[in-house]
Amino acid sequence: YVIFTDLDGTLLDENYTYDDALPVLNTLKERNVPIIFCSAKTRTEQEVIRKKMEIYHPFIVEDGSAVYMPAGYFGERKGEVINGYEVIILGVRFEEIAKEIEKVRKRYPIKGYHHMTVEEVAEVTGLSIEEAKLAKQREFSETVVEASEEALEELKKKFNVVIGGRFIHVFGKGADKGKAVRILTNLYREKYGNVTTIGVGNSYNDEPMLRAVDIPAIVRNPDGKWADLKIENIYRANGIGPKGWAEVVKKFVLGE
Ligand code: 2M8
């Protein structure tokens, strides 16, 4: 088994904690089941979570903009070597996105993280100052917190513009959580033969990831509702966030 998972609202609850998933996470680690983060979060944000959870498998950053693999993870080199990782980039660099946003901003109102201080990002997201700093270290996307319809229409001509959990995510048209999941799935199958993939998410922007796995599952949101996704055979866990996550893993991976 390989588990692809979203972070915010899925493995992490609204306070960015994951106590409810901890026992199951530990069992998965003992059994060496790869847990692959697939999230809007940046590399540096995910590095902190990886370290805290002691999960050292590949990970997908900024809405499928890049696949980071620990060097040598699949044996032969699979991507460009950057900072001790092998990286496959599907999106575009932040600078390109920021440049376009500045152009659009001359005509229409739009505000992204790069217009805000660390304190302001912490305030709107509920992240700590330290975490907000990492959320601002964007390599392949920008998080937009306010924008007019016209501004978004302009940006859509050049980039993917999607609603994340709460904010608007702007990233390269080639970036795609689903494509990133398929790349990694193929690498696992090349190396280990037949593997079953499970995807866990909570929102609309997880749909590409969920469509790319064998077993798609969603957890409940804090309001008690499931995202309205039209995916055949999707499993709807009863629990909210990490509680639902544990439920999915128990049912499909641990056979409990
Ligand atoms: C943004 O992502 C979330 C989840 O999709 C959102 O839009 O609500 C990103 O900036 C991410 O990097 C950051 O960690 C998160 C904080 O809530 O917000």
Image (spheres, rainbow, N blue to C red):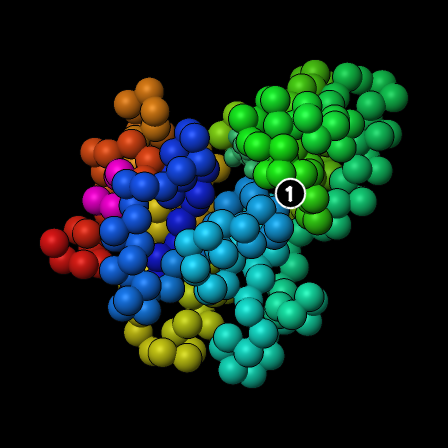
Q: Is residue 218 visible?
A: no
Q: Which segment is the magenta one?
A: 243-247
**Residue at 79% in and 37% down:** 98
31 up-or-down from 89: above or below: below
Q: Is residue 119 magenta?
A: no
85 up-or-down from 115: above or below: below
Q: Secondary structure at mark 1?
A: helix
Q: How many marks?
A: 1
User: For residue 54, what is the image quadrant?
Assistant: bottom left
Rendering quadrant holding ligand 1: top right
The kind of residue tagged 1 is: Leu
Asked if the beta carbon under badge 1 is closer than 8 A to the nearest atom of ligand 1, the reply is yes
Residue wearing tag 1: 134
Using the image as rendered, state which of residue 24 and residue 239 is in the foreground: 24
Q: Is residue 250 visible?
A: yes
**Residue at 34% in and 78% down:** 193
Which percent across, then down, holds residue 177? 51, 49
Which percent across, then down, holds residue 10? 38, 39
Quadrant holding the C terminus: bottom left
User: For residue 197, what is the image quadrant?
Assistant: bottom left
**Residue at 82% in and 26% down:** 104
Main SS of the magenta segment?
helix
